[in-house]
Image (cartoon, rainbow, N blue to C red):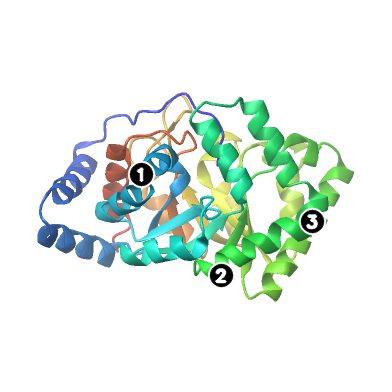
Amino acid sequence: MFRENNMLAAAPVGRRRFLAGAGLTLAAGLGAGPRAMAQLAASSIAPSVGIQLYTVMPSLSRDFEGTIRDIAQIGYKEVETIGSFGRDPVEVKALFDKYGLVSPSQHIVSNELYRVFDLWVKRQIAIADRDKAFLHEFDLSRIDETVPAAIASAKAMGQRYVIWQAIFASQIATPEATRKLIAALNHAGDLCADAGLTFGFHNHDRELEKVNGVSAYDRILAETNPARVKMEIDFYWMKKAGADYGAYLKHNPGRFKLCHLKDMDRRGNIIAPGSGVMVSRELIDMARSAGIEHFIVENDSSAIPFSAERNAFGFMTEIMQP
């Protein structure tokens, strides 16, 4: 969710992709009637196109409701949250309802950790301080505090999935450390299932590094309960690690329920979907065939302009047409 990337601006899109994005941009600038018609048409094509709101966190900090409104006006119908943004989750849900948004999932972030993220996005604290706070929050000994709090906020926001979004090197440094992490993920899965929710794990590239032919991610897939620990696959970080995401989807039916979509330029940097060399109709078709239900646009830099979100939505609605 918060890996650094130096490529903040989206590359120019192709003519077909540009027209889709430009049409949505134009609709957003028109009156309420045309805008509503454009949103209705888009949602009938791709009702499950969502966005991880970490992507627009600087804007959320400046104008929370205005940013939520703008995301809805672009045409997104689903949003993935960063905890409850340090706010009352009941109030957040009411705001989503006001603008016709639903939220299927959240990345586990307490109110305290969200404030740390907010300071980091504003460049008021160092990355080391951010990571220290994250490690404290996700200390495996605190899981009976961290996960139930996330469950409570998820229920208040009408969410189904509670996502463990990242791990650090120390948590998979040795086979024993990885075993402890896996036990914690299974416990989190049990806590969520007992509460009527579903626990998920989101990958980056670190856990895909192989040691003696096996990665920590391989162990997580093999040793967690497939009924209670689902996966949110981030295709960019899979590709960055050189992993075969097609093979993971094929050999683990029913495990992958959500995905993060960001594109990759020819130098390996993160850019918006539709601007790079990775996100395609073929990728979407493969994900659908594997049972993925939620397609979530994201940019880890948390600083891309709204034009990129508009273009990404236009591109995604185009390639997700039947």
Q: Residue 63 got which mark?
A: 1
Q: Position of residue 193 (x, y in %)?
A: 68, 72
Q: Is residue 238 above or below residue 121?
A: below
Q: Earlier in the sequence, mark 1 or mark 3?
A: 1
Q: Position of residue 65 (x, y in %)?
A: 35, 52
Specify the quadrant of the image occupied by residue 10: top left
Residue shown at the point (46%, 28%) measured from the top left: 269
Q: Residue 155 got which mark?
A: 2
**Mark 3, secondary structure of its residue:** helix
Are discs 1 and 3 less than 8 Å apart at CB?
Answer: no
Quarter of the image with the C terminus is bottom left
Say whether residue 159 is visible: no
Q: Is residue 200 above or below residue 14?
A: below
Q: Earlier in the sequence, mark 2 or mark 1?
A: 1
272 to the left or right of 260: left
| Closer to viewer: mark 1 or mark 3 | 1
Residue shown at the point (51%, 50%) measured from the top left: 85
Q: CA distance from mark 1 to mark 3?
A: 36 Å
Residue shown at the point (75%, 44%) measured from the top left: 216
Q: Position of residue 268 (x, y in %)?
A: 48, 28
**Mark 1, secondary structure of its residue:** loop
Q: Residue 143 got which mark?
A: none
Q: CA distance from mark 2 to mark 1?
A: 25 Å
In the rendered structure, which amino acid carries the disc numbered 3?
Answer: Ala
Determine crowd level at label 1: few under 14, some 14-19, many 20+ residues with C-alpha closer than 10 A: few
In the rendered structure, which amino acid carries the disc numbered 2?
Answer: Lys
Residue shown at the point (63%, 46%) measured from the top left: 112
Q: Looking at the image, which is closer to me, 233 or 146?
A: 146
206 to the left or right of 16: right
In the rendered structure, which amino acid carries the disc numbered 1?
Answer: Asp
**Residue at which label 3 appears:** 184
Determine crowd level at label 3: few under 14, some 14-19, many 20+ residues with C-alpha closer than 10 A: some
